[in-house]
Image (tube, grey):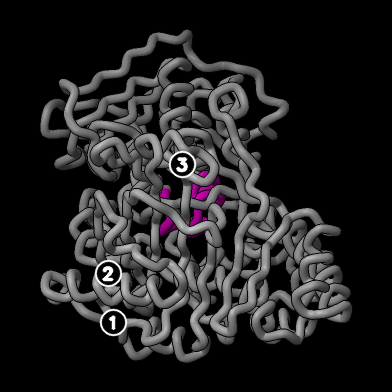
Amino acid sequence: MTRSLPGPSDHVVVVGAGLSGLSAALHLLGAGRRVTVVEREALPGGRAGRLDLAGYRIDTGPTVLTMPDLADEAFAAVGDSLAGRVELIPLHPAYRARFADGGTLDVHTEADAMAAEVERFAGAAEAAGYRRLRTWLEQLYRAQLRRFIDANFDSPLGLLNGDLARLAALGGFGRLDSRIGGFLKDERLRRVFSFQALYAGVPPARALAAYAVIAYMDTVAGVYFPRGGMHALPRAMADAAGDAGADLRFGRRVTRLERSGDRVTAVVTDQERIPCDAVVLTPDLPVAYGLLGRRPRRPLRLRHSPSAVVLHAGTDRTWPHLAHHTISFGAAWRGTFDELTRTGRLMSDPSLLITRPTTTDPGLAPPGRHLHYVLAPCPNTDLGPDARAWTDLAPRYRDTLLRELERRGLDGIEAAIEEECLVTPADWQARGHAAGTPFSAAHTFAQTGPFRPRNLVRGTRNAVLAGCGTTPGVGVPTVLLSGKLAAARITGVPRPAAARARTAPAPTNTRTAPAPTKETTA
């Protein structure tokens, strides 16, 4: 059994109403704790925020939702359900991959449909390889979920269990690129099942094969989109928490933590002092450590994932060859990862994620208009251009990006833009994200599992961390689990969601918000 916080925990203050904080709040409420959530912005969501721009409803954070059952587990903690709060639309295809040679592949999550698409694209041998790969991904996921991903670690000895042997037997400690290559020979197909390592901050040639579990989430478990945009998920979680008795306080910036010895006794905001028995901190690690006044001792400095430039474009036209999610691969591959993780140069031949949410939900834009989200990975500010350099670089890079999109078939895109918002590493850094990246600490071997920054901080007995910088890591599913694991540190090991009875206080809807203001990014 892993450690839980000693002492009383009747009233817990959760700092941050992002996905991890809201997940923690729901699990704490389900265990009978009184919960106050403090959020600096005027709305919930954290990284999964919302920007309203002249009728365009823009998700400012993640655009890909997988493993919705993990979100449902948080709702179930208070006797609620995801389906009762959010309409989820399965995406078919989950992605469309477009390659520099002109080839196009639709990524389906249903096995027969995907095998048929792979056969059309690359032949019968590759389709058979895909089926073997799919079986392996399913086995890999089962070996990892409950003992490596959905788990708190107190030391590396926590790895010593039967699932470790199963993971090793599956080749999980080999290299991702070569393991995928054992199933698929077509280099383009191999990209489709390994590009996800980029967001973990490690090139496929160096990433552990165990990270193929992200490809399982994307290509086997399915990709979904909430009607109303990704921000509909944290908004629904906040509503469920409020209905279960949470005190939600928006527009409050935490300025310090009051302490008595090794315990936090109150959270102080720019408007009030909130006494507490325990605290969950969800800001990025440097901010959380700064509030605590201490940080863990690590033999090596944390390495951070690459960052991204994101162009949000509201347009008066669209391009039919785009799916909801389109991955536009450049010709370069290994060299791209060298630029992002070693030399610190902007991608010379970029691979881009283009999301068109109005494909699925036209209501996110004014009538007859379309919303496009273009994500271009780039070096973080530790390795590449720093925040000051982006002041001059941003408009030039925006123009370069639009020219590249024109070259890849989005003809007339610049003239079609009516409203736009460009987000660079400087903006991420200004929001408190270390190294100017929203993807936090990279998932190198030395920063994964029991070696990742723990959600307990030495020297503080009643504080626990949540979010993508701590256990288990980056991504919507893992951040939701991070909140659950933080709550478990306070309440003890939780029962399975299906077995929980609702034990939260009676609904009070004590949400406190400032006067209405323009919604901002989180």
Quadrant showing the C terminus:
top left
Real-space Cα separation, disc 1 to disc 3, in angstroms: 30 Å
Q: Earlier in the sequence, mark 1 or mark 3?
A: 3
Which structural element holds mark 3?
loop
Real-space Cα separation, disc 1 to disc 2, in angstroms: 8 Å
Q: Which residue is mark 1?
A: 383
- For the magenta stretch, what is the residue range? 467-482
The numbered mark at residue 435 is 2
Which structural element holds mark 1?
loop
Q: Earlier in the sequence, mark 2 or mark 3?
A: 3
Q: How busy is the neighbourhood of tag 3: few (under 14 within 10 Å), some, or many (20 plus)?
A: many
Relative to 446, is 417 above or below? above
The numbered mark at residue 467 is none
Q: Amino acid at mark 3?
A: Met
The residue positioned 32% from the left and 13% from the top of the image is 510
Which of the two residues, 173 or 193, is positioned nearer the viewer here?
193
Q: Amino acid at mark 1?
A: Leu
Picture coordinates of residue 335 (x, y %)? 46, 91
Q: Amino acid at mark 2?
A: Ala
Question: Any magenta on residue 501?
Answer: no
Relative to 128, is 35 above or below? above
Real-space Cα separation, disc 2 to disc 3, in angstroms: 25 Å
Q: Which residue is mark 3?
A: 230
Is the residue under label 2 in contact with that under label 1 (CB below 8 Å)? yes
Picture coordinates of residue 463 (x, y %)? 36, 43
